[in-house]
């Protein structure tokens, strides 16, 4: 496994981040524990979760699964850089969601209890809260840091100007501010190249891409559907038909290079500016084994150019749409 720093921090994390959203609803707890053990064995020390994971009827379930894994000992918590999130509604009563100082305090304490730990390494705002001023958010973070409950703060699903706004407010308080941004980013969806990635590079934030395979479309879906291995319905089927020509060309390139399509998609992200670690979210152990191959793939400029031809990217704004 390769390691890097998370953004401008001194925190060392693996180049792959283990996403746990499937744990509980789709992956039974013993299997989830086995996946996490394997991740540690393979050098993955960066785990991502959220307080709302577990499904609408059982929010917090995923954190509970991680908590019981940590509680089983063996240095599991100590060897893990743990990231969780706050924002989504955890109940129907007022102040059970968003980023008010009150909810941040309560949600953090609830996450710590479920996770069976006394601190979170990276506490992420799952979405921008347009109703709460940054002065209030950073005050709550400052208190939590002073209490030793969190070490770093990150964002998720922020626009570039939101990152600038957050960092300006943090600077007024002499705080470190955001150290990471978790965004939708993959070969097919490259919108954050307009402003989010340039902002992240400017402020020293590490990009943590989610959905690196675009819901499985970059994981060899054309071949799998042709062979009857996978069947798509609804929006996924429509998306496949819309992008079939691109995806076919992409899978042919992967075959030419001798890589699995999913490995190639992850490797491409590892070559992108500011990217710290794409999130892999295995439902079964075999999916984790496959993702690990991506770290060892080196893509030359000719291959990167061919990928850009198949899936055109975005220029930095404003040059993308103006002179």
Image (tube, grey):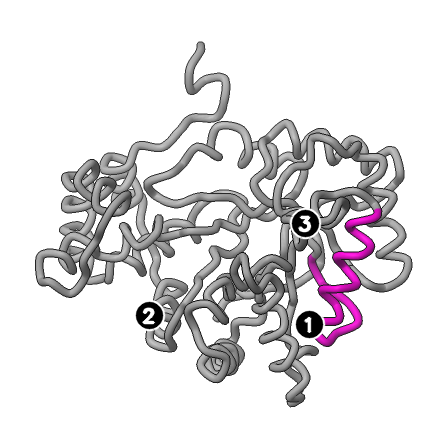
- Callout 1: SS: helix
Seen in the picture, residue 264 relative to 242 is either above or below; the reply is below
Would residue 42 be seen by someone viewing this image from the given angle? no
Q: Is the C-beta separation of discs 2 and 1 under 8 Å?
A: no
Residue 122 horizontal/vertical position (percent): 69, 58
Q: Is the C-beta separation of discs 3 and 1 under 8 Å?
A: no
Is the residue marked by circle 2 packed among few (<14), some (14-19), or many (20+) residues within 10 Å?
Answer: few
Q: Residue furthest left?
A: 227
Dominant SS type (magenta): helix
N-term mark: 2 or 1: 1
N-term mark: 2 or 3: 3
Please tell me which residue lies in front, 226 or 80.
226
Residue placed under numbered mark 2 in the picture = 290
Which numbered tag is attached to residue 115? 1
Nearest to the eye among marks 3 and 1: give it.
3
Would you say 323 lies left or right of 188 here?
right
- For the image, the number of numbered tags is 3
> Is residue 209 inside the magenta stretch?
no
Is the residue marked by circle 3 packed among few (<14), some (14-19), or many (20+) residues within 10 Å?
Answer: few
Would residue 7 be seen by someone viewing this image from the given angle? yes
Residue at horizontal 34 percent and vertical 61 percent from the top? 297
N-term mark: 3 or 1: 3
Magenta residues span 102-122
Spatial CA distance of label 2 from label 1 is 28 Å
Spatial CA distance of label 3 from label 1 is 22 Å
Residue placed under numbered mark 3 in the picture = 92
């Amino acid at each position: 496994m390769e390691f890097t720093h998370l953004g401008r921090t001194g925190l060392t994390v693996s180049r792959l981040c283990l996403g746990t959203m499937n744990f509980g609803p789709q992956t039974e707890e013993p299997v989830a524990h086995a996946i996490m053990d394997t991740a540690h064995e393979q050098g993955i020390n960066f785990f991502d979760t959220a307080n709302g994971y577990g499904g609408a009827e059982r929010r917090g379930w995923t954190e509970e699964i991680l908590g019981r894994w940590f509680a089983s000992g063996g240095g599991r918590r100590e060897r893990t850089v743990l990231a969780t999130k706050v924002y989504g509604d955890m109940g129907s009563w007022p102040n059970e969601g968003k980023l008010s100082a009150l909810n941040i305090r309560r949600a953090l304490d609830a996450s710590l209890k479920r996770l069976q730990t006394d601190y979170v390494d990276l506490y992420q705002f799952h979405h921008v809260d347009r109703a709460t001023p940054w002065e209030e958010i950073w005050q709550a973070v400052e208190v939590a840091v002073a209490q030793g409950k969190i070490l770093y703060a990150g964002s998720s699903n922020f626009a570039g100007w939101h990152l600038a706004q957050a960092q300006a407010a943090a600077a007024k308080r002499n705080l470190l501010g955001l150290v990471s941004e978790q965004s939708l980013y993959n070969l097919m969806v490259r919108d954050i190249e307009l402003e989010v990635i340039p902002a992240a590079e400017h402020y020293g934030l590490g990009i943590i891409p989610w959905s690196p395979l675009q819901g499985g479309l970059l994981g060899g879906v054309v071949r799998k559907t042709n062979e009857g291995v996978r069947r798509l319905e609804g929006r996924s089927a429509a998306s496949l038909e819309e992008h079939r020509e691109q995806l076919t060309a992409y899978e042919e390139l992967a075959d030419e290079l001798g890589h699995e399509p999913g490995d190639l998609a992850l490797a491409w992200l590892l070559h992108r500016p500011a990217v710290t670690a794409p999130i892999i979210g295995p439902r079964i152990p075999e999916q984790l084994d496959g993702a690990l191959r991506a770290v060892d793939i080196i893509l030359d400029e000719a291959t990167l150019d061919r990928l850009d031809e198949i899936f055109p990217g975005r220029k930095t704004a404003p040059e993308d749409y103006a002179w």
